[in-house]
Image (cartoon, rainbow, N blue to C red):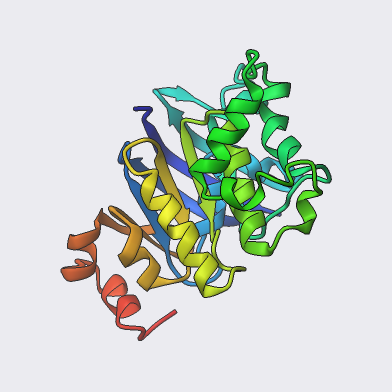
Amino acid sequence: MRSLSVRNLNVWYNGQPALKNVSIDFPSGQITAIIGPSGCGKSTLLKSLNRLQETNDQTKVNGQVLLDGANIYDARMDVTEVRTRIGLLAQKPFPLPMSIYDNVAYGPRIHGLAKGNLPEKVQTHLQAVGLWDEVQDRLKAPAVGLSVGQQQRLCLARTLAVEPEILLCDESTASLDPISARGVEELLRSLRGHYTVVMVTHDIDQAKRLADHVVFMWLGELVEHAPAAQFFNAPSHPLTQQYLAREIG
């Protein structure tokens, strides 16, 4: 199982600090939930884990994100490889403007992972996200014709098809109806033990349902992190206690 760690990570947007000296080891093979109020640095931390925040030219990063001990911000690291090894499931589904089949096949094709069994690979990943039975008779239909919940499951299949080692989820159920959201939650739960999952959520109850480990952010700082049972039953920091009691944030 691949290891993912952060050491003394600082991020600035337009000269303003967004993350302040964050250090943490993410438990391998487990689901870590990052919680906290809006603007506290949750998504910044998540996007820093696969260098996605570099799409903003006004961003400055200092510190280390270590994947198996190698700093992904090292100048010798290939950004495309980093983002393949550390996949991201975004808040809103963005199916590619192509067929259902080609959405899942796209990554293996461009990364040379097809190896002559592409149809089998597509089927395997559609089955993994519970979509195969729903779409097997219309694989060549445009992906944009799927419901929002189906599109999000398709995006998860597309992400897993390139065989990432880490999966990042940025409020991946926030745009879904409750039934679809629970379906995605079940999928994420099924990945436990096979992937290291790091998820951002505004929903404390969702973190309670899914997380093995919880990280609490406040104003760009990591305030507290602990195994989920300890975090929710006996938080040690006063800010954490107030946030969980819905007194702040």
Residue drawn at (68%, 46%) of the image:
59
Q: Position of residue 186 (x, y in %)?
A: 41, 56
Viewport quadrant of the C terminus: bottom left
Q: Relative to residue 229, is residue 56 depicted above or below? A: above
Q: Relative to residue 227, is residue 28 depicted above or below? A: above
Q: Relative to residue 139, is residue 243 depicted above or below? A: below
Residue drawn at (32%, 44%) of the image:
30
Residue drawn at (65%, 27%) of the image:
119
Say whether residue 195 is left or right of residue 245: right
- Total label count? 0
Viewport quadrant of the N terminus: top left
Q: Can you see residue 83?
A: no
Q: Relative to residue 10, is residue 111 depicted above or below? A: above
Q: Position of residue 231 (x, y in %)?
A: 23, 63
Q: Can you see residue 57?
A: yes
Residue drawn at (46%, 30%) of the image:
165
Q: Position of residue 200 (x, y in %)?
A: 48, 58
Q: Position of residue 29 (x, y in %)?
A: 32, 38
Q: Quadrant of residue 172?
A: bottom right
Query: Of residues 69 and 116, which is closer to you in this image?
Result: 116
> Please, which residue is most extreme toward the top here?
115
Query: Of residues 43 and 113, which is closer to you in this image?
Result: 113
Say whether residue 141 is left or right of residue 129: right
Say whether residue 169 is left or right of residue 212: right
Q: Quadrant of residue 126?
A: top right
> Please, which residue is most extreme toward the front here?
137
Say whether residue 145 is left or right of residue 175: right
Query: Of residues 19 and 187, which is closer to you in this image?
Result: 187
> Please, which residue is most extreme toward the bottom here?
247
